Amino acid sequence: MQAMVAATAPGCTKATVYHCDPWPVRDAAKLPAVRKANVRLMKRALRPVPTVGGAELVYVPTPITGRPTFAERAHAHSEALGAALGGEFLDADAVHAHVGLRGGWVALQHARPGVPVHVTEHATFLDQVLDQPDSRAMYEEVLARCTGFHAVGEPVREPLVAAFPKYADKIGLIPNAIPFGPPRAEPVTELRRWLFVGSLIERKGVGLLVEAFASCHAKDPRLTLTILGEGGMLAGLKGRVAELGLGDSVTFVGSVTSDVALRMIGDHDLLVHASRLETFGMTIVEAVACGTPVLVTRSGGPDATLLGVEDAVGEMIDVTDDPATISEGYWRLRDRFPAGVDLARAREVLSARYGFEAVGKIHHDLWFGEE
């Protein structure tokens, strides 16, 4: 979302980002009183702060309890935003919403009549949304009412078209915005410092990655692996690393800010991304933007994102349950590196597709009409 704002805020007379921030309420019985107090205090407490691209950012506290459906969360977010706005409409000539639920529905509740509302969807949890009857109905309302609806890749668009064929022509494609600053000062010369960036969950394939790293490390003990992220698999991964005797070669960093993550990508030799499913693959493109090669699965989004520069950025491998797929891909890449990789060309191609200027223009043309 930060990259989206950085790409689109420049060129706008004014840009304000409202972020509804869930505040857990442990005692459900107290939720009505907490929400009432939140509404009372909202206008006094809220202060816009500067953020990227010259935009303003407003955090909107949103009390929530239990495990509400996506639709119930959307209602809570709408109530909180309504209190933040003092009952007024959003002061904007165009409104962009981040994901259909909760952002799209909330934006539609508070945009002035006649103001275009565009929604960008990237969520990998759409199956969960559509499995909930109230959330599915709300999602269909978003599709019906919004001015434009844009998925970041076919892995997002396809299930939505299948679920709502009536709106197939309305569900378009739009890329994520990626920062393309100067590449790393020193180019990669050896592919020995591996990096994983992402949630430590089964879908990200991080368990297979550890097994593949162990196999490669047995052949080249100089290899290291840094795992950046948090999630439910953390304890199990640490245990497996200890069992494999890799404690000195594998480092768990935890969660970091996006700036730190980008710096770490630029400090390593290879981003390894073994995900089972990606809607776009932002981290992969960010690595190429930094000048770092990638070893990445054909997990949906990256197949389209890297189209035409697959060999130039590194190595693409199939999604399988066999860690050997990852290790064999690594050795193939290492055998042809660096002569068989052209990161400079890949950066040029991907910057023209996903750089801030390119993506910002696409959104501005949608919001305000083509210049």
Image: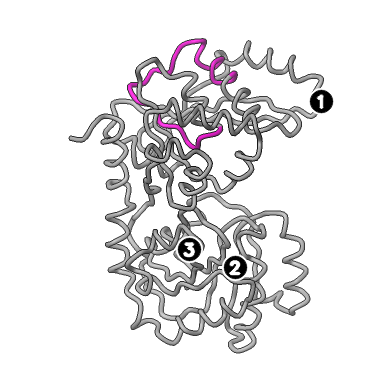
| Mark positioned earlier in the residue sequence (3 or 1) | 1
In whole angstroms, how far apart are the C-alphas of marks 2 and 3?
A: 10 Å
In the image, what residue type sits under mark 2?
Thr
Residue 64: mark: none
Where disc 3 sits, the SS reads helix
- Nearer to us of marks 2 and 1 is 1
Which residue occupies 49% across, 53% down?
Answer: 155
What's the amino acid at mark 1?
Asp
Number of other residues with Cα within 10 Å of mark 2, as a class: few under 14, some 14 to 19, many 20 or more: some
Numbered tag placed on residue 27 in the rendering:
1
Q: How is the image coloured?
A: one colour
Q: Is residue 75 magenta?
A: no
Q: How many marks?
A: 3
Q: Is residue 89 above or below residue 50?
A: above
Q: Which residue is mark 2?
A: 226
Magenta stretch in the rendered image:
79-101
The residue at 39%/64% (across/down) is 288
In 3D space, how far apart are the residues under numbered discs 2 and 1 (Cα atoms)?
39 Å
Three-letter residue code for mark 3:
Ile
Q: Secondary structure at mark 1?
A: loop
Report whether 366 appears left or right of 47: left
Q: Could you tell me which residue is drawn at 59 percent across and 76 percent down? A: 224
Q: Earlier in the sequence, mark 2 or mark 3?
A: 2
Q: Position of residue 300 (x, y in %)?
A: 48, 59
Q: What kind of element bears circle 2? A: strand
Q: Which of the two marks, 3 or 1, is nearer to us in this view? A: 1
Q: Quarter holding the C terminus? A: top left
